[in-house]
Image: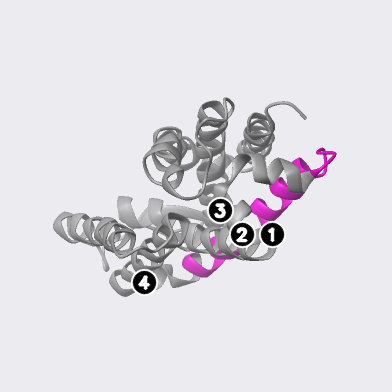
Amino acid sequence: MDYPYVWFGLATLVFWAAVFAACRETRRAQLWMSSLGLIGGPMLDFWVYAYDFWRPSQPSIPWGSMFFGFGFLGIVVALTISARGHVLRPEREQTVPRHVKVGILAGLAATILIAGLIGVNSVLATALGLIVGAVAISYTRNDLIHLVWRGMWVSLVAYVLLMAGTLGLASDPATLAKSYSSFYVRNGPFITGALVLFWSAAFGAFVGPLYPWGKNLRLASA
């Protein structure tokens, strides 16, 4: 299969379109967050994960990063905050000041940086930072704790489905993984699989409630 990461990204976009069509009430949030993923995906892949996870010389990684970053972030956010009979309304009792939000995001970035400086793998360091962010969101808005857990499971299921579908098209998944990931070459399939699943869970736990937390919104009965 030529350019597998592009196909992985395109599969993510198809999934994204299906979610966008099905979840009308979350379309604004999905588009807004996906725009962040369009930028953040390539930044992580080339500035962080290329250090000890990806093989950045692979030609399909730039496009795949943009497609996956845009699609997956929007998918997780939309499916996390979408609930039948509920809509997003302004939250007035547990609003989080702007300086607190900035401080939490800075703490997330600092966690990733410090973990990287002491030799922690970049993907694991990112996951730890995301967990710190999810805990901070739960602490500042305890009404969003259920979205932290829901986001974690949404992200895990969506990632496994996308990965299984893409690898299922490959004639030799192991060789494909070795050609794309230096981490896989050193650690094998089980450790690599556990790492990316842990990252996926941490990613969902943080970004799932991120939109209502950032916008001071809450899920309320329609």
Q: Earlier in the sequence, mark 3 or mark 2?
A: 3
Q: Earlier in the sequence, mark 1 or mark 4?
A: 4
Secondary structure of the residue carrying tag 4 is helix
In terms of image quadrants, where is residue 129? Answer: bottom left
* Label placed on residue 135: 4
Residues at badges 3 and 2 in contact (C-beta under 8 Å)? yes
| For the residues bearing labels 3 and 4, Cβ distance under 8 angstroms | no
Is there any visible trace of residue 124 in the rendered image? yes
Q: Compute the Cα span from label 2 to label 4.
A: 25 Å
Determine which residue is flagged by label 2. 192
> Magenta segment range?
148-172
Q: Say above or below: 52 vs 116.
A: above
Alpha carbon distance from label 1 to label 4: 29 Å
Position of residue 176 relative to residue 90, above or below, is: above
Secondary-structure class at tag 3: helix
First along the sequence among labels 3 and 1: 3
Disc 3 to disc 2, C-alpha distance: 7 Å
**Residue tagged by mark 3?**
183
* Image depth: mark 3 or mark 4 in front: 3
Q: Which residue is drawn at 52% across and 55% down?
A: 81
Whether the residues at callouts 2 and 1 have beta carbons within 8 Å, the answer is yes
